[in-house]
Amino acid sequence: MTRAAKLSAVVDTRVIYCGDNLDQLKKLPDGCVDLIYIDPPFNSNRNYEVFWGETIEVRVIG
C-alpha cells in the first residue's frame, strides 16, 4: 500500500477543513497535508474584484 493510500485511509480526503490552520493541523497526522489555502486577510482595504458569471467565476487580483 502506498503512503498516500495509507494516509487517505486515516484522513478523509473529500473534506475541506476550515478554521485556524494551526489548530486544524494539530488534528491531522504528520506529513498528510499537500496544500494549505489561506484566504486574504480581512480589513486589508484591497479590492479583489470578484465577478460572477452565469456558470464560471473570474477573479481579478491586482
Image (spheres, rainbow, N blue to C red):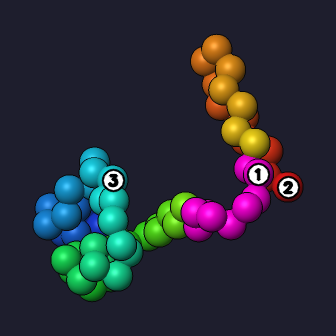
Kindly check if marks 1 and 2 are in contact, taking CB atoms under 8 A apart as contact.
Answer: yes
In the image, which is nearer the foreground, mark 2 or mark 3?
A: 2
Mark number, residue 47: 1
- Relative to 60, residue 34 above or below: below
Disc number lying in front (3 or 1):
1
- Picture quadrant of residue 17: bottom left
Residue 12 in view, yes or no = yes
Q: Which residue is mark 2?
A: 62
Q: Is residue 55 magenta?
A: no
**Residue 2 in sight from this viewpoint:** no
Query: x%, y% of residue 8?
Result: 22, 61
Q: Residues within 10 Å of mark 2 (few under 14, many from 20)?
A: few
Residue count near mark 1 (Cα–Cα under 10 Å), binned few <14, some 14–19, many ≥20: few
Mark 1 or 2: the one toward you:
1
Q: Label 3, secondary structure: give it.
A: loop
What's the amino acid at mark 3? Ile
